[in-house]
Image (cartoon, rainbow, N blue to C red):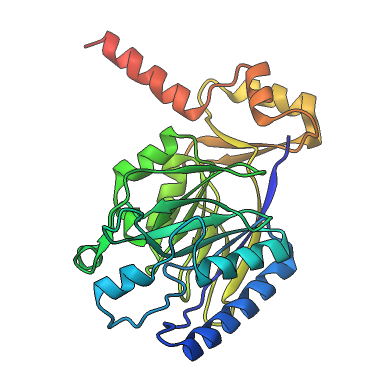
Amino acid sequence: MARFVGISSISFSTGTGEDSEKMRRAMSLWESYIDTASLDKPDIILLPEIFLQNTASSASKEEKSEKADLLPEGGEITEFISRKSKEHKTYIFASYWRKDGKGRGRYNSAVLFDRNGKVVGAYDKVFPTIGEIEDGTLPGKEAKIFQTDFGRVGAIICFDLNFQELLADYKNKGVELLCMLSAFRGGFMVKSTAFRNQIFMATSTPGENSVIVDPLERILAESSAYGRIIFAKINLDSQIVHIDYNQQRVADMKKKYQEYVRIEVASPEAVYFISSLHPERSVQDMIKEFEVETLDEYLDRARRERMKGI
């Protein structure tokens, strides 16, 4: 069954809220950005890494940790995003500092809010930079999946993109949409991650080159200096399969389901990208019906055959 998901990504930087007046101005700007992004009626809105902080960048690590929000009750940043997600009936992924409940410091967290403004949970940056750790940021433990009303969503934050073990953990846990809240853009690494892990990716950075990418590495939307808020709609009910051994099976699938299945061919990569548009049958239902072998299944079979010859 088609699962269309609207994604909005906001690419701005507003500085720090080191006093109440600067915090008020920064929140006012973010409110206008979120209100603009909501015009497309997205299912989820992404905000960049540490989109808002309530201390000066020059503040001590002790002060930053002390003023960080303690979830789930949170503080003014949590209350602000909670109010906006409830107002627009959308999920919001926001990165900001989360206080450690045991008083050890703070995390750089991607906090997910649901359509009712409730905190679904928080992913803690697993690989903070060396500078962040020296400044009091604690490393998170693992990939974390959030079940939303449209699919399985995960997050990484900035430097995390460099670590294949974390990305593999997300794939093994079945992530469908991986959101990167970041201070750096990532470039081709974002696209290659989407293809290697057969997932959709969406990023939010403070400026240009925030992207929404499909599993074939195609950029569906990209921010620029002239367009800081982007939107794209994706279909999570999709699957990559290899061309080998599947050509007739996929042809038979198309013959039966016609306009209710979309089959795209990535010729250089030798794969099909199959999406269900059917109101009752998922892409997995169709794959099972026609005994189509997914890409991962095919590669695993090739590994087994190789071992027989060793």
Q: Quadrant of the N terminus?
A: top right
Identified at 36% across, 39% down, the residue is 168
Q: Identify which residue, 90 or 195, lies in the foreground.
A: 90
Identified at 64% across, 21% down, the residue is 248
Q: Identify which residue, 271 or 80, lies in the foreground.
A: 80
**Residue 193 x/y as whole percent:** 41, 48
**Residue 120 x/y as whole percent:** 56, 49
Quadrant of the rendered structure where residue 281 is? top right
Left or right position of 13 against 40:
left
- Most extreme residue toward the top is 308
Left or right position of 97 against 308:
right
Identified at 25% across, 62% down, the residue is 129
Instruction: Tell me: residue 34, above or below residue 280.
Output: below
Q: Identify which residue, 92 or 179, lies in the foreground.
A: 92
How many discs appear?
Answer: 0
Residue 20 seen from this side: yes
Identified at 36% across, 54% down, the residue is 101
**Residue 104 x/y as whole percent:** 26, 57
Quadrant of the rendered structure where residue 258 is? top right
Residue 9 seen from this side: no
**Residue 270 x/y as whole percent:** 49, 36
Instruction: Tell me: residue 290, above or below residue 188.
Output: above
Q: Quadrant of the C terminus?
A: top left
